[in-house]
């Protein structure tokens, strides 16, 4: 297949250079997502002639690149977001890391950059986490966010498969997404800006999908909304909510059935790992909850009719950062559509299913419940 | 307007640090587009608190950036391509530089990065070219390619307006696009990959528009075509050819009139400066040539019917690199549509209008003919 270069690097050739002096840990109340990074980083270079070089763990530090490097000009860049958790026994766990590796390979390949053996990068990340272990808190809600990134470093201008690439992984300690009870967000449904399109790149985690969202996000924010709700097509099909996948618990008007519905993987949305996990979990609960899971198109008209009929029970976005983020209103064509929240508790703006999903995933991530989604690596 | 930060840097505060040792010039027969760069570069930093810093001219060298810099993750990057020419009197000229500056501001603003006063950057570039003057050949077809670039350098992860930005300009000496007579290219009309979409970013010169084109380009190349022809929509509307705008000289089936037609600026295509210049020039020739210029939709069906009726006279792509690049065939749905070339000369695969345009623009760029498109700066 074009762009596939499945030679891989070898985790056994890992070269480790540790810091002479370590940074102080960040106090829990000062943790800001993606602001502070640990002492070390992973770097692995690739070039078209010799393939992948040895993996390195080395002190966290600046990248030095020619100003002509294609990552600065043509968006040759893709990334993943994943977390390392510590369980009560002190073991370090990853949540479905093979899914992140597979998606990084898909994104990299889409941009004509090389792929690698997923398990080899997981092994290197394992050694990295052994060194950075002190940065991983075992408190529920705390974790070490990992950012594997692939960039094109070829230093001559040309829109073609880069002849040099750098894979790096950096890590940032993070705290709970909701520090004072789960809060629901308001979304502005965007029709002026369209995030993705058929036969485009909306299903890849590539740099170019993100920067164009800053401006619509700023507009939403200035109008008092927290995020955008991305729509597509003449019938205003719902695709994503900000950088989250979209879910709705409703009564299906045709079947009368209680359904958790989410947009399908039709190329317009990112195939979220939290999304996939939620689909699997809620499906496994169907006998108990009576809730059917369906991947299917949702239009703004569907939502408006369902709100009018009082058929929407819960609505939320999902992602690695928040797990679930309940939605309380949608600004659309100058009006606010209020989503009636079924509050599970007085301090929570999330409904019972939303909170059940959140708790189930946290329990798996922190090893409270053993589940094949969680992999003990240390 | 959201994202507009029209404070500007001040060219009078320019700081210049020159190299102790200069590089040898590249022999004319060794010039490769975007591979070698001159001795110096322009850098101008911006941050959200203090705005633009002083402009700098300093030795060409690596950029040092945190691995968390948003340019590596979210595609906060936009650029321009323009050329400096030397005329027979030794004067240095730019071709409509204010258009490149305006488009860079548009692209930067679209990504919530700052804008600047176009004339201030032209003044800094002028000083830069005074220093790099020896790199500019006065031979027709030779020039110094300039690459102004704006990148987000904020070193914390977040998809929002970057709080730090770097504007830089690098320069690469280039030779003629066609070294041995104008050659026509074959295009593969792409329906599996779509470059841009309504309310997207196809009309901005941002990094994210480019890397996704590498894979379709590789597929086209493996099938024996030189570039992609980008289509959009159910009726296979022609948008761009590779990274060029698209033009066709044909007899309009409705009017019988000889027409130079090019896709309109509907958001799906880059507003090319060469495109705009060609429209203006050919319009100015209408009394002489009888050729009417029209910006209008062109579908693959239009092209197929016109080929069947022998109504296509010339077809070409346009851009800063090539000026014009004639098209001889289009692969579409498994068949090759042959465009009958009206050769202007035995060693040229371009038609008379294509060559007239090429010569007229070269004459303006090199100051053979005085025209307001060409600005003498030194």
Image (cartoon, coloured by chain):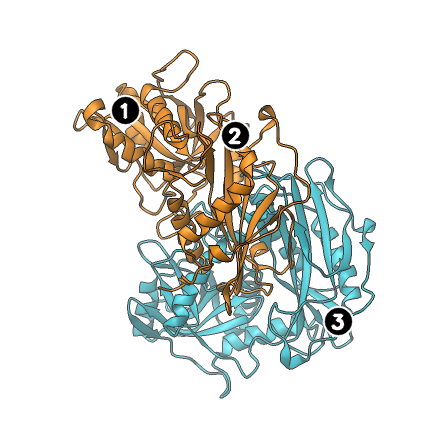
Chain colours: A cyan, B orange
Where does the C terminus of chain B fall, quadrant-wise?
top left
**Chain under callout 3:** A
Nearer the camera: disc 3 or disc 2: 2
Q: Is residue B238 visible?
A: no
Tell me the mark number nearer the camera, choosing from 3 and 1: 3
Q: Are marks 1 and 2 in contact (CB under 8 Å)?
A: no
Q: What residue did someone put label 2 on?
A: B137
Note whether B158 is above or below B87 in the view shown.
Answer: below
Residue A153: quarter of image: top right
Q: In percent of the image, x 30 and y 68: which residue is there?
A: A305
Say which element carries label 1.
helix
Q: Along the horizontal axis of the image, is A265 left or right of A40?
A: left
For disc 2, the neighbor class at 10 Å (few under 14, some 14 to 19, many from 20) is: many
Q: Position of residue B246 (x, y in %)?
A: 36, 33
How dense is the environment of label 1, judged by Cα within 10 Å: few (below 14), some, or many (20 and up)? some
Q: CA distance from mark 3 to mark 1?
A: 69 Å
Q: Nearer the viewer, residue B99 or B155?
A: B99
- Residue B353 appears left or right of B119: left
Give how far apart the Cα atoms at labels 3 and 2 are.
53 Å
């Amino acid at each position: 297949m074009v762009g596939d270069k499945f030679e891989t690097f070898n985790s056994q050739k890992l070269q480790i250079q540790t810091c002479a002096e370590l940074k102080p840990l960040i106090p829990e109340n000062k943790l800001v997502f993606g602001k502070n990074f640990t002492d070390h980083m992973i770097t692995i270079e690739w070039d078209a002639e010799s393939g992948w070089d040895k993996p390195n763990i080395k002190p966290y530090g600046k990248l030095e690149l020619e100003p002509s490097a294609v990552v600065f000009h043509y968006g040759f860049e893709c990334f993943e977001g994943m977390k390392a958790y510590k369980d009560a026994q002190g073991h370090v766990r990853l949540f479905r890391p093979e899914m992140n590796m597979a998606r990084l390979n898909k994104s990299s390949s889409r941009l004509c950059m090389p792929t690698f053996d997923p398990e080899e990068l997981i092994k290197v990340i394992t050694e990295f986490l052994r060194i950075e272990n002190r940065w991983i808190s075992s408190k529920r809600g705390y974790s070490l966010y990992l950012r594997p990134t692939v960039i094109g470093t070829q230093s001559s201008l040309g829109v073609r498969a880069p002849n040099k690439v750098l894979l790096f992984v950096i890590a940032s300690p993070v705290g709970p997404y909701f520090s004072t009870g789960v809060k629901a967000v308001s979304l502005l449904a965007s029709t002026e800006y369209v995030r993705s399109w058929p036969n485009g790149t909306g299903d890849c985690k590539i740099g170019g999908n993100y920067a164009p969202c800053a401006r619509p996000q700023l507009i939403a924010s200035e109008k008092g909304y927290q995020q955008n709700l991305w729509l597509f097509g003449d019938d205003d099909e719902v695709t994503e909510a900000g950088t989250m996948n979209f879910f709705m618990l409703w009564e299906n008007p045709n079947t009368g059935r209680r359904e958790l519905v989410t947009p399908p993987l039709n190329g317009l949305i990112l195939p979220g790992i939290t999304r996939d996990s939620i689909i699997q979990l809620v499906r496994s609960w169907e006998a108990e909850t009576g809730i059917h899971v369906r991947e299917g198109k949702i239009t703004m008209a569907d939502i408006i009719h369902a709100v009018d009929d009082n058929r929407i029970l819960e609505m939320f976005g999902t992602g690695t950062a928040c797990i679930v983020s309940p939605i309380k209103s949608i600004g659309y064509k100058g009006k606010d559509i209020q989503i009636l929240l079924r509050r599970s508790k007085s301090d929570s703006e999330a409904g019972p299913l939303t909170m059940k999903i959140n708790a189930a995933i946290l329990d798996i991530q922190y090893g409270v419940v053993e589940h094949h989604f969680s992999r003990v690596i240390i």
